[in-house]
Amino acid sequence: MFAALLVAMFVLTGILMAEVYGRLRDLSTASTDNLQWNIAQLEVELLRLDAQISTTAQQVEAEETTPADAAASLRTRFDIFYSRIATYEHGHLYQPLWQGAENAAILKGLRDYLQSGAVLVDTPDAEFRTHLAELGQLTAAQKKPVRALLLNGVAQFAQTSDEARAALSQTLTRLALSSLLLIAVLMSLALKLLRLLRQGRRVAAENEEVRASLETMVASSLDAILVVNRKGRILEFNGAAETVFGYSRKEVLGKNMAQKIIPQHLRGAHVEGMRRFLATGEKKVIDAGRLRLEAMRKSGEIFPVELSITAAELGRHTVFVSFLRDITHQVQAEADLERARDEARAGEKAKSDLLTVMSHEMRTPLNGILGSLELLKRDPLSERQLRSLRAAKLSGDLLLSHVNDVLDLSRFEGVQEAAANVPFDLPELVEGLMTAQSAPAKARGTALRAQYLTDGLTHVLGDPAALNRCLVNLVGNAVKFTQDGEILVEIERLQDGATVEIRVSDTGSGIPEDKIDSIFDEFVTVDPSFGRESGGTGLGLAITKRLVTRMGGSIMVDSIEGEGSLFQITLPLPQVEAPLQAAEAEVEVLEDLPPRQVLVVEDNEINRDILTDMLTELGQEVETAPDGPTGIEAAQTEWQHIILMDISMPGMDGIEALSHMRRAGVESPALAVTAHASAKDHKRILAAGFAGIVTKPVSLDQLHKALSALADEGAGGPEGRVFETDHSQLGRQTRDDFVDRMGQDKFAALIGKFSKDASALLTSLQGAEALSAEAVQEAHNLAGMAGLLGEADLQSALKAIEDLPAAQQASELPDLVDAARHQLEALSP
Amino acid sequence: MFFTTVFRPIAVAATLVFTLATTSLPALAEPILTVKSTGSDRSIALERADLDQLPREVVRTRTIWTEGLVEFEGVSLATLVAELGLTAEELSFVALNDYAVTIPLSDAVEGGPIIADRMNGEPMSVRDKGPLWVIYPFDSNPDYQAEKYYARSIWQLHRIEAAL
């Protein structure tokens, strides 16, 4: 706008100036000559000619001059006048003069005059004087017209120059106006520029301030700051960067950043990354926040840095601003920490492993101690010795249960052992638990009950064994710590449909506030003294928590000391549609039995161990005797709740031993353990006074059922009950059970011993045609053991030898021996 | 403007013998230009033949007094000044009608004015502004198109007065 106006003003002024220049040039070139003067000269010269004519006439009259001289003078005058008229007539400057009709007439008159005058003047000298009078008249006649011409010319030329002056004046006025306007425009422009200049100065000052403070910030930054252009040249390098990299600012400004501070092995990636960013704008490192990379010092040392790179627009250029921090020390510290943590973990693991190994290794000698204590008890002891023995036994049993807890803990720690996922009936499981725990609860004057708050609990999918164990622990704890109170188990399916919440609350002693956070840790007992009294290792809740976690659930505790505790398990137990018959059978829920003393009379050492182990697991206190007479003695020495006796024993068999016991006044109910499977045998055994029969091989489940039956019905329960092992559950499962209980080492030792014994028997029978009584007994024992080891086929083969009638021995024995050997060879170690 | 007060015809006998003039000139030949010293009675009379002897120069130009392109021939002022050895700063040129004008010596330069005695090849009569006319080359040098030079373009020139 301003510019356009300005240009217009300049153009206008230029045009006017050109016009003025033109007019001035017209004036300066004076193409007009000195017109007024020249016109005036016309009259002067006419008058001078007229005067000359008069003078010449007088001189000629007076004869003062020669005719020639007179003629020459006059001719010159005439010629001068002639010349002037010719000049006026032909000079283009004078043409305007002749435009008026009056002046044209005057010119014509003058021309006529010159013509006739010239004729007169050019006459020879001699005749000259005769024409003087006529020439005088003609000349005088021109005075008036010339005067008129003069006046006209003066007026005309005056007007012309007036016009010229006026035009010039007008142009000058316009020029002045336009110049004034131009000046006004220029002044306002100047004002505007001045304002802009001031504004610019102010902005510059502000920018300078900002720049100075930014510079201070950059210089005083603790982080190294680098600014790099698109070509990778370093534009800025602050003080911290100098310290970090060892370069001075001067050394690196304008240099390629990659060559200076990027380690060789990262340069390729850097160049590629820059190329990609510039080509596609794709950012990987840029604007990615804090990154950890490596950088290189001047010395070539490579060190870890934390950096962030930002792309910024500087004017029209893209620059990269990098903030770097030397994290050598930080990385070192982190590495130290990591190492310390790993070492701590490894130490923890080693400790845990040691504990497991120790516990495992402790169990074998513990069994030995406990067995020895049993043996010791059979000797005649003083009352004091007996008390010490009982104390030793109690401590030994407690120790064994602790060791078992530790082993369980490490077993559940193994992540490889996934939770089972089978359908089961949750209320049934809980009811079983209620049944088992109601007796000890009642003993402490505590009411125990369960409440099912929602439906959809009967067919659920989960790990019943693990859940049972958890609930046993929780309810068992509640029973332990509650005296004359109430224990409530609430079960509820939550809104989401997949989760079940089980709450076990009691009105017992509660958990002190300082213990509540560590209640699920290993080896934590609320009160060490109480813990000891209650026989807890402090592992129950730890095991519970691990089991719950393994099942994908969570456990919480809330408690007020002196008022009670609330444990809450939340775990996924999705409902299942149709419960399968077969699946039902697999559900194994073992309820806790009331703890009682059980006397095991069994000649086979392995069987004795196994029975002891199973009974211990079922919460029973066990004493053992290796034969009938020892059993009878033990039964009389100690008051036994239950007697568990093998039928086939060398010397005195079970039936005979029991009759001795009964005669000696022992009234404890007795269960027979036998490999005899025939109904005739069972009848005979029951007739001898046994409350029930447990067939070999004995499974935990079967033993549990038998003992439960005794517990429910009290002494002298339903006679004639036979607890047979479900053979479909034998095999691997039994063997795994065995390994779990006894440990792999003991199991391997047993297998070894068994193989040796069996091999010896079969070798002795090689080529034999009849079986000795000892051989039949040995076959019987080995068959029982094979059953316990889960080797059902081998058991059958041995049993076939044992049961071979004497008549067929000669013909069939070799084949049976071969078959048994074949089975034995297939036995896995 | 400078005017000489009196114009006095100078007798041929009174003229000094001009070095360039041929002595064989007839006595009747009339001088067409008289160069007169202002400080003394000395004067130099030049005849048409004298001018013809000097280096000639031609100027073709338009003038404000004539029509169309005109060819003037004569002796350049520079040549004349050199030949006559004129040194005065100013020269006074006088015409038959007593018009007079002062021409500074500085005008006597190469490419400057000539003292024309012929127009379109013909000697000029008094009626044609003869016998001599100072002509500046107006066309070839526009600087001369100024009133001052128009005033110096004296016609019917017959005398130059200068301090000799």
Image (cartoon, coloured by chain):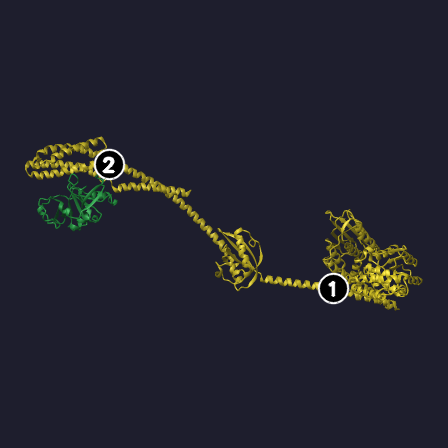
Chain colours: A yellow, B green
Secondary structure, mark 2, is helix
Q: Is residue A639 visible?
A: no
Where residue A625 appears, as percent x and y from the top left, is 87, 64
Residue position for label 1: A355
Quadrant of the rendered image containing residue A796: bottom right
The residue carrying pointer 1 sits among few (fewer than 14), some (14 to 19) or many (20 or more) residues within 10 Å by Cα, namely some
In the picture, the quarter occupied by the C terminus of chain A is bottom right
Foreground pick, A372 / A827: A827
Foreground pick, A594 / A672: A672
Where residue A322 appears, as percent x and y from the top left, is 54, 56
Is residue A775 found left or right of B155 in the rendered image? right
Foreground pick, A177 / A682: A682
Residue position for label 2: A157
Secondary structure, mark 1, is helix
Where residue A255 appears, as percent x and y from the top left, is 49, 59
Give the number of callouts: 2
Where residue A177 appears, as percent x and y from the top left, is 35, 40
The residue carrying pointer 2 sits among few (fewer than 14), some (14 to 19) or many (20 or more) residues within 10 Å by Cα, namely some
| Chain of residue at mark 2 | A
In this rendering, the label closer to the viewer, 2 or 1: 1
Quadrant of the rendered image containing residue A752: bottom right
Is the same chain shared between marks 2 and 1?
yes
Residue A612 image label: none
Is residue A67 found left or right of A779 in the rendered image? left
Amino acid under label 1?
A: Leu
Quadrant of the rendered image containing residue A697: bottom right
User: Which residue lies at the image location 42% right of the left edge and 42% below the top edge?
Assistant: A1
